[in-house]
Image (spheres, rainbow, N blue to C red):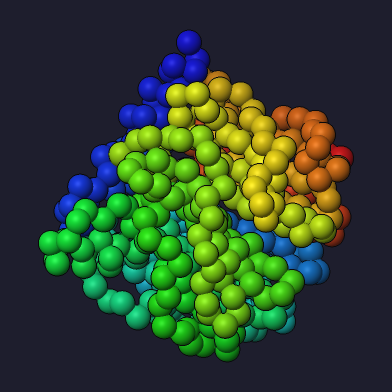
């Protein structure tokens, strides 16, 4: 009964995928609707946030404050926060529906980078904005648009990463190829595409837009993980012909070259809609990739974990209960931590699993719960410990230690 209820609610949030329109409708819950306990869209927009620890253990978070993009700092792992620094000089709309939210990443020399999506006048369109701080978060540069393409189309669901060499990578979901196909009266184009841009000068400028892959899902977040060699791996929900929404990955080289696209999940979820439910990915000390993702395929429903190897996947397993959703993970050495949300009909529960042997064995703990609205959890690392950053209506920017 609970599984049926969960799937009914989940599918009700999906919207029809594009069928040849220049700008097809986005999922319904990206533009209005209710949050987990009836919270409205405006209240939910103040919940979306992301955070990261720097090498000194200082926690940095990007979030919304009275319509502004803002960055806050905590020196005691989220127990208290200093006054936020405004990134946007004036309030502006921000895409905060579903998998959309502002992003933050820290550079090797203490740089603070922030991206977000600003909606444009036409429905379901947007542009990816970027700003940086080179003075420890005291001030931020004037925001600018990352991508060269300035059509009033979808440039949304930005992802941000910084390599150990300091190269900044911004990726996003882009519909310029769909629009071109419609204009040329070409065969129908599946979904959207993944594009990216690189900065070699600490975010002062970005190279031209480069396409990583055609036929991505339209509204699921992109996951990025940097590697020691300077490459970055992207993982996203792909649309395999004709309408299978599983996952694919590809590498972005420091030169800017895109690697081949490889399928890495095989639930065979056939649906002409976007679930607003993207994956997460991390790398361990043996250079193995670990990933989590969501599927509602009839025979493969729930959150799944797997190690992703060069020649396939292994150790695939289902995570959590019937209503598990929006999982994230992080890795320290060969230790892996996963966190996710589950709704029990009254409360949203924050749960976690921890493996000390690279994903072979696991133990599960419950970390927190809330009866009110909440953002998606994010697993963070500081030193040799795992934390979960969880923004809720009851407690903003809460950080919870995952017990060993």
Tell me: 166 left or right of 354.
left
Percent position of residue 336, x then y: 77, 46
Q: Observer-nearest residue: 327 or 186?
A: 186
Tell me: 73 left or right of 75.
left
Tell me: 242 left or right of 158.
left
Q: Observer-nearest residue: 16 or 91?
A: 16
Percent position of residue 16, x then y: 26, 40
Q: Indicate whether 365 appears above or below 127.
A: above
Write down the quadrant of residue 57 in the picture: bottom right
Tell me: 228 left or right of 49.
right
Classify the position of the C terminus by image quarter.
top right
Q: Name the residue at 14% across, 66% down.
A: 183
Q: Name the residue at 21% across, 53% down.
A: 188
Q: Indicate whether 300 appears above or below 386.
A: above
Q: Residue furthest top?
A: 1
Q: Observer-nearest residue: 298 or 26?
A: 298
Q: Observer-nearest residue: 179 or 167?
A: 179
Q: Name the residue at 26% across, 55% down.
A: 189
Percent position of residue 250, x then y: 55, 62
């Amino acid at each position: 009964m609970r599984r049926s209820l969960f799937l009914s609610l989940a599918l009700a949030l999906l919207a029809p995928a594009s069928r040849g329109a220049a700008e097809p409708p986005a999922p319904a819950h990206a533009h209005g609707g209710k949050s987990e306990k009836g919270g409205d869209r405006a209240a939910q927009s103040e919940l979306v946030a992301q955070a990261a620890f720097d090498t000194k253990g200082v926690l940095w978070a990007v979030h919304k404050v009275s319509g502004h993009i803002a960055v806050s700092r905590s020196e005691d792992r989220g127990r208290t926060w200093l006054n936020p620094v405004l990134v946007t000089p004036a309030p502006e709309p921000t895409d905060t529906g579903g998998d959309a939210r502002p992003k933050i990443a820290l550079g090797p020399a203490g740089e603070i980078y922030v991206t977000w999506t600003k909606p444009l006048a036409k429905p379901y369109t947007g542009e990816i904005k970027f700003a940086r701080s080179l003075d420890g978060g005291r001030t931020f540069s004037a925001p600018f648009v990352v991508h060269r393409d300035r059509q009033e189309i979808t440039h949304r669901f930005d992802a941000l990463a910084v390599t150990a060499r300091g190269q900044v990578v911004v990726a996003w979901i882009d519909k310029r190829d769909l629009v071109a196909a419609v204009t040329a009266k070409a065969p129908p184009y599946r979904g959207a595409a993944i594009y990216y841009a690189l900065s070699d000068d600490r975010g002062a400028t970005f190279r031209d837009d480069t396409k990583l892959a055609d036929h991505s899902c339209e509204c699921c977040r992109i996951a990025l993980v940097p590697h020691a060699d300077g490459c970055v791996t992207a993982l996203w929900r792909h649309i395999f012909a004709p309408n299978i929404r599983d996952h694919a990955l590809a590498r972005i080289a420091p030169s800017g070259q895109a690697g081949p696209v490889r399928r890495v999940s095989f639930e065979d979820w056939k649906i002409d809609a976007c679930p607003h439910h993207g994956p997460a990915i991390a790398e361990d000390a043996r250079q193995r990739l670990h990933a989590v993702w969501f599927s509602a395929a009839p025979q493969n429903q729930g959150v799944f974990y797997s190690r992703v190897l060069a020649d396939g996947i292994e150790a695939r397993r289902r995570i959590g209960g019937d209503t598990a959703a929006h999982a994230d993970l992080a890795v320290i050495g060969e230790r892996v931590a996963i966190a996710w949300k589950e709704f029990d009909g009254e409360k949203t529960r924050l749960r976690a699993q921890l493996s000390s042997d690279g994903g072979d064995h696991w133990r599960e703990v419950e970390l927190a719960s809330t009866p009110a609205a909440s953002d998606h959890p994010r697993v963070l690392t500081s030193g040799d410990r795992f934390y979960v950053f969880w923004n809720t209506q009851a407690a903003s920017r809460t950080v919870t230690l995952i017990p060993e």
